[in-house]
Amino acid sequence: MPSSTARLHVPALAVAIAALLVWATPALAAYSLVWSDEFDGTSLDTSNWTIDIGDGCPSLCGWGNAELQYYRAENVAVSGGNLILTARRQTYGGRQFTSGKVHTRGKHAFLYGRMEMRAKIPTGGGMWPAFWMMPQDDVYGSWAASGEIDIMESANGTTTVGGALHYGGTWPNNTSTSSSYSLGGANFADAYHVYAVEWEPEQIRWYVDGVLFSTRYSWQWHSDGAPENPLAPFDQEFYLILNAAVGGYYTGCTETACVTASLPQQYLIDYVRVYQETANQAPVVAITAPTAADDPPAGDIVIDATASDPDGSVATVEFYAGATYLGQDATAPYSFTWTSVAAGCYAIVARAIDNQGAFGEDTVEITVGAGCGQAPFHGTAPVLPARIEAEDFDLGGEGIAYHETDLSNNGSRYRLAEAVDIQDCTDVGGGYNLGWIYQVEWLEYTIEAPVAGTYTIDVRVASPSLGGTFHLEFAGVDRTGDVSVPPTGNWQSWTTVSTTATLAAGVQVMRFVPTLQGFNLNSFEFASPTAASDLPATRLELHPCQPNPFNPATTISYEVREPATVDLVVYDVTGKVVRRLVSGEAVVAGRHEITWDGRSDAGQAAAAGVYLCRLDAGGDSRTIRMALVK
């Protein structure tokens, strides 16, 4: 973690000046650091943070989310360069758990900018760590008419993190949009990661470790408190919140008995930083050694970089391997010796920070020693069912993980050291897509099928006029045949095409093969399989909901041919639970019906869009799609 001697602390006057300069930012303006807490001391800086106390009662028991913890000052500490929020199994204030929560309300609030945190999150059944923002003054009315920005939240096993906006009317007439990001099965609690939003007047973007995974635009939000204001409610000052909740609707755990996390659990926050656009220009940095072509041997590796600043000076250059901080150098020529590097594939990052806190970065992907051969991009093969982003093709490079017809990334986004063409995407959730796809090319993705069976695969594609075709190979065998891509009218007008593939159980490589060019590719979404060991389809049926599309409610019917324990759950397209209609209920044989009123487990109105309803019973499952219109 960066040493305290090189941390940047910005006086209050600079914050005020930077806030004014936002309104007159030149074209080359950069995000400059305007406020931070590096947690380098031995106690919480109370000029920055207030410790929240209690369980929300009497006005908002369980903090409005059926949370199970009581927040105490004793659960908040600063030590070893971290803010530590500790969740404990401890009886206090009528609750069975205690934890920590801090916020900056009344001390520091911000309008626009980049809000960033580096943290290692707690994990286990019932855990709910979060980094989020609420309005300083509720300009447009009470929650959620004045908005809420969730920068990072995760639950239970913490293999995904989410970002969300809450807006619309006051509860219960509020709504929300959300997206999630995964590491392909790895746990975010295993290491530090950097979580951020970049908040601008007309869009908000979410990042994990520098990877953009979601974008929301002003036309996608609104406030009933200002129906004629297209920027409301996200055009007012918001303050920062950090907390480690136990239980609550987001975890699906609202009773003490279902908390299975090994407690105590710690939420370790290395830093929180806020950047805003100023007249300052960002420094320029370039890694000069090693290069992508060097293939250094395992052992010590010297990383060299050059850096300059067009309107100031370079304060320091930090070096990272992915999101793992390695060290820094404050004196040119900038260099760091990375010791005892094992064979593998790495992304080295150099971040130059100037005297006003603006930063620039350069990334080089290198192969060390024997390398990693072909390997999943996130380190672990995603376990189906899963959503696989097209840009997250395997590591290994040209001729191993992919074949490209040109030598550079035409879109100049995301994985800049690879030749695959990646560009910004305007599909739901934002992020990136693959473009410039030619029929002699291919890409590979390592996946894991937990059981043998037939998997439905929804593929997001776009094509202006000609359409195209592709097939998917698994373990070298074409399992889908040619799948047609229809014209959609634009390279960024997205639609879903569906296919099926019968797969053996186990880890295997999927190869995407375009057979007729003329389209862009965004993602593959695998549904749960109809496995060879499943019951015959006639023993379990999930019928199309009626009506569909619907507003405000729809009726879902299902049949079981013998008594069974049933789960019937509504998910959004990112896989996040929206509503548990039936949860572990023993039902008799026959036909059953239930109505979904278009609301979440928390009683909030769901946003318009596509939802998935999944039925699980007797080891079998069925899924249908539903469209909520407003």
Image: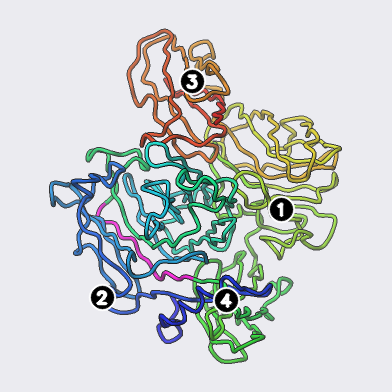
Point out the tag, 2 or 3, that comes first from the N-terminus: 2
Instruction: Identify the residue shown where x is 13% and y is 46%.
Output: 94
Q: Is residue 451 magenta?
A: no
Q: Name the front one of labels 2 and 4.
A: 4
Circle 2/circle 4 CB separation < 8 Å: no
Q: Name the front one of labels 3 and 1.
A: 3
Instruction: Find the distance from the CA under tag 3 to the CA under tag 4.
Output: 50 Å
Q: Name the front one of labels 3 and 4.
A: 4
Q: Residue under circle 4? A: 278
Query: Which mark, residue 401?
Result: 1
Query: Which mark, residue 43?
Result: 2
Determine if residue 297 is in view. Answer: no
Instruction: Identify the residue shown where x is 61% and y is 26%.
Output: 454
**In x, y percent, where is residue 33?**
50, 76
Q: Nearer the viewer, residue 240 or 189?
A: 240
Circle 2/circle 1 CB separation < 8 Å: no
**In x, y percent, where is residue 229?**
54, 50
Q: Residue under circle 3? A: 554
Instruction: Find the distance from the CA under tag 2 to the CA under tag 4.
Output: 31 Å
Circle 3/circle 4 CB separation < 8 Å: no
Point out the tag, 2 or 4, that comes first from the N-terminus: 2
For the residue marked with disc 1, what is the amino acid? Ala
Point out the tag, 2 or 1, that comes first from the N-terminus: 2
362 in relation to 154, above or below: below
For the residue marked with disc 2, what is the amino acid? Ser
Q: Name the front one of labels 2 and 3.
A: 3
**In x, y percent, where is residue 416?**
70, 64
Instruction: Find the distance from the CA under tag 3 to the CA under tag 1.
Output: 44 Å
Secondary structure type for disc 3 = strand
Q: Is residue 265 magenta?
A: yes
